[in-house]
């Protein structure tokens, strides 16, 4: 198809701009869906494989490429797509309490981390990783599936730091074994750093660092040494620390400067600060105030 070329001459410099279908770069479907805040890229791949996604009224296949101008639907519902330049990148920092699960809904009716998060219009919060029901602490959420995918991908090798209260007599042989590596049922695992932080009686506090997020990996490493973890709290994920003033069950939106730093840490270009309509900002501020009021009660 013919592409029109617009030619402008500014101060003697000829500038061209190509319009038409090729002016919009196509991208993998799962990447575009993730950017729209529907879910993480891996989750979108599963949805595409399950036949839940259509492109221009045709059932999508893994490997399909689209532009933000295509008509994409999930479960029959249209998905508003955005170009990479227009998509917002927002991040929430949440202090997860014990007893909450990291899922949008639970058949058993247990509380989930999404119950307390601020509501969004036209977007969804995507959890960056998981914490099991008995683990507390730092959990990040974002509206940008590309950021979530970059931080969760196994190749990212991001440090995760936990405060651990251990019951039992911890010996130097135990520490050495966990630092060098232990063979668990799903492969080798190790702490890259182990620091003692005191304790009372039979309980001792440690801070440990691990580079991956396998299920119950921190607990299983300690259990491999005949020791029991009775408190576990994540205090750092990559370059993000759990703010000391953020109490359990509360969230805060990450400042734009920190979002940019997190983006660069994940190997992504920072984005411009999101432009919010006054009513949308007022709604968000009310939700932030409501959680503080609820906490005091």
Image (cartoon, rainbow, N blue to C red):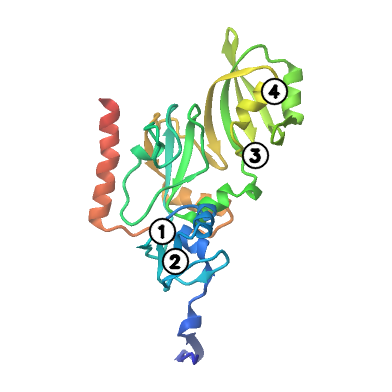
**In percent of the image, x 76 and y 24: which residue is there?**
176
Q: Is residue 276 above or below residue 106?
A: below
Q: Nearer the viewer, mark 1 or mark 4?
A: 4
Element on which disc 1 rests:
loop
Category of crowding for the residue at label 4, using alpha-carbon neighbours closer than 10 angstroms: few (below 14), some (14–19), many (at least 20): some
Can residue 271 be spotted in the picture? no
Can residue 200 be spotted in the picture? yes
State the separation of the CA atoms marked 3 and 2: 37 Å
Q: Which residue is mark 4?
A: 224
Mark sitting earlier along the chain (3/2): 2
Q: Nearer the viewer, mark 3 or mark 4?
A: 4
Mark sitting earlier along the chain (2/4): 2
Place of residue 252 in the rendered image (x, y in percent of width and height, measured from the top left): 38, 40
Category of crowding for the residue at label 2, using alpha-carbon neighbours closer than 10 angstroms: few (below 14), some (14–19), many (at least 20): some
State the separation of the CA atoms marked 1 and 4: 43 Å
Q: Which residue is mark 2?
A: 54
Q: Is residue 282 found left or right of 30 in the rendered image?
A: left
Q: Which residue is mark 3?
A: 211
Place of residue 150 in the rendered image (x, y in percent of width and height, measured from the top left): 57, 53
Place of residue 120 in the rendered image (x, y in percent of width and height, measured from the top left): 32, 51
Q: Nearer the viewer, mark 3 or mark 2?
A: 2
Q: Are marks 2 and 1 in contact (CB under 8 Å)?
A: no
State the separation of the CA atoms marked 2 and 4: 47 Å
Q: Nearer the viewer, mark 2 or mark 4?
A: 2
Q: Which residue is mark 1?
A: 88
Element on which disc 2 rests:
strand
Toward the viewer: 199 or 177?
177
Q: Is residue 256 above or below residue 133?
A: below
Q: Are marks 1 and 4 in contact (CB under 8 Å)?
A: no
């Amino acid at each position: 198809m013919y592409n029109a070329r617009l030619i402008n001459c500014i101060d003697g410099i000829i500038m061209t701009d190509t319009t038409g279908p090729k002016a919009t770069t196509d991208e993998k479907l799962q990447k575009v869906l993730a950017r729209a805040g529907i879910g993480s890229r891996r989750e979108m791949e599963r949805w595409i494989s399950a036949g839940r996604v259509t492109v221009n009224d045709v059932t999508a296949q893994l490997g399909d490429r689209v532009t933000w101008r295509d008509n994409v639907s999930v479960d029959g519902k249209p998905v508003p797509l955005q170009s990479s330049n227009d998509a917002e990148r927002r991040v929430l920092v949440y202090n997860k309490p014990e007893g909450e699960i990291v899922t949008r809904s639970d058949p058993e009716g247990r509380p989930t981390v999404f119950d307390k998060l601020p509501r969004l219009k036209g977007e969804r919060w995507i959890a960056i990783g998981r914490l099991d029901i008995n683990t507390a602490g730092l959990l990040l959420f974002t509206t940008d599936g590309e950021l979530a995918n970059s931080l969760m991908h196994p190749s990212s090798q991001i440090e995760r730091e936990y405060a651990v209260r251990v019951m039992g007599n911890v010996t130097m042989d135990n520490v050495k074994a966990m630092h060098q590596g232990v063979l668990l049922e799903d492969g080798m695992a190790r702490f890259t750093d182990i620091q003692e932080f005191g304790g009372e009686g039979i309980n001792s506090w440690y801070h440990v660092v691990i580079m991956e997020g396998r299920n119950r990996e921190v607990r299983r490493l300690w259990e491999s040494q005949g020791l029991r973890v009775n408190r576990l709290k994540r205090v750092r994920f990559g370059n993000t620390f759990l703010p000391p003033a953020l109490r359990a069950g509360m969230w805060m939106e990450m400042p734009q400067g920190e979002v940019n730093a997190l983006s660069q840490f994940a190997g992504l270009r920072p984005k411009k600060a999101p432009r919010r309509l006054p009513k949308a900002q007022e709604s968000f501020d009310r939700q932030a105030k409501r959680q503080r009021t609820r906490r005091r009660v």
